[in-house]
């Protein structure tokens, strides 16, 4: 019985061809060469990626998480007013901390401690903290405000794997918010 091989699409040039061997994925010599190069490139790319990941410092990881976390805060708060002055937020606004990152690093990624804030309040009025404190209770509820105050001085040093988990978490939460709209 003759073992017939069906025609298939070349992985490089996309032409339909009838292979001579069962495992043949490309149509001819040139495409085979191109395919080998492509595999080598992919491998090199993967290796560079692994190396880059290895060279990242704890601080780099925290900064990446900050970016993801801020995106989540902006998505959550984009239809609310500025947490300090109440003005409607426009396209460009900040994620402003109530308790500062410098003094309270453990509250850096606390969703009750960070809210959408206009650039004026965040960057030109040092967070406009007096107004922030007047509105924060209404925004998060008094129970959460008490909890936030209580957790001010706990010490949390996130490990790299913990940071990775948080990155995934806030990416997911952002996606969920976007899908709800
Ligand atoms: Zn081909
Ligand atoms: Zn403001």
Image (cartoon, helix red, strand yellow):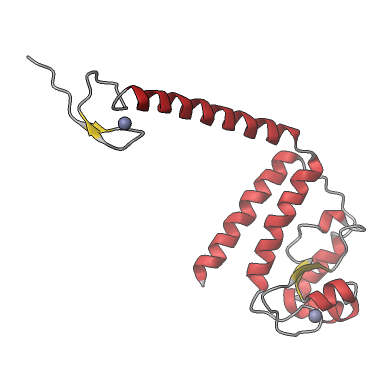
> Who is closer to the viewer here, 149 or 170?
170
Give the camera-side residue of 172 and 91: 91
Name the spot of residue 86 as percent of width and height, x first: 76, 84
In the image, taking residue 126 as reference, residue 21 lies left or right, namely left
Q: Residue at x 80, y 57 (%)?
A: 108
Look at the picture and state if 59 lies above or below 66.
above
Residue 84 sits above or below residue 27 on the image: below
Q: Quadrant of residue 1?
A: top left
**As rendered, which of 175 and 144 lies closer to the eye?**
175
| Number of disc labels | 0
* Ligand 2 visible in quadrant: bottom right
Q: Residue furthest top?
A: 1
Point 47% across, 30% down: residue: 38
Please state the horizontal and vertical placement of residue 160, each as a whole percent of the image.
74, 40
11 left or right of 46 in image:
left
Snapshot quadrant of residue 82: bottom right
Residue 133 in the image: above or below residue 11: below
Q: Quadrant of residue 126?
A: bottom right
In terms of depth relative to the viewer, which is nearer, 140 or 17?
17
What is the residue that sits farthest to the front in this orientation?
A: 30
Q: Report x, y in % for residue 96.
A: 80, 68
Q: Determine whether 60 is above or below 142 in the image.
A: above
Furthest residue in direction right, as rendered: 103
Coordinates of residue 26 in the picture (x, y in percent)? 32, 27
Residue at 71% across, 43% down: 162
């Amino acid at each position: 019985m003759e073992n017939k091989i069906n025609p298939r699409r070349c992985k490089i040039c996309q032409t339909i061809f009838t292979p001579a061997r069962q495992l043949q994925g490309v149509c001819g010599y040139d495409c085979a060469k191109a395919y080998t190069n492509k595999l080598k490139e992919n491998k090199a790319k993967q290796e560079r990626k692994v190396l880059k990941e290895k060279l990242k410092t704890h601080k780099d990881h925290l900064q990446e998480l900050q970016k993801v976390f801020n995106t989540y805060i902006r998505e959550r708060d984009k239809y609310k007013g500025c947490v300090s002055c109440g003005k409607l937020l426009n396209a460009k606004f900040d994620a402003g901390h109530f308790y500062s990152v410098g003094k309270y690093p453990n509250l850096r990624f606390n969703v009750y401690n960070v809210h959408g804030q206009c650039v004026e309040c965040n960057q030109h009025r040092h967070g406009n903290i007096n107004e922030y404190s007047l509105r924060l209770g209404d925004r998060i509820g008094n129970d959460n405000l008490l909890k936030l105050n209580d957790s001010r001085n706990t010490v949390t040093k996130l490990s790299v794997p913990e940071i990775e988990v948080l990155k995934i978490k806030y990416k997911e939460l952002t996606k969920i918010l976007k899908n709800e709209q």
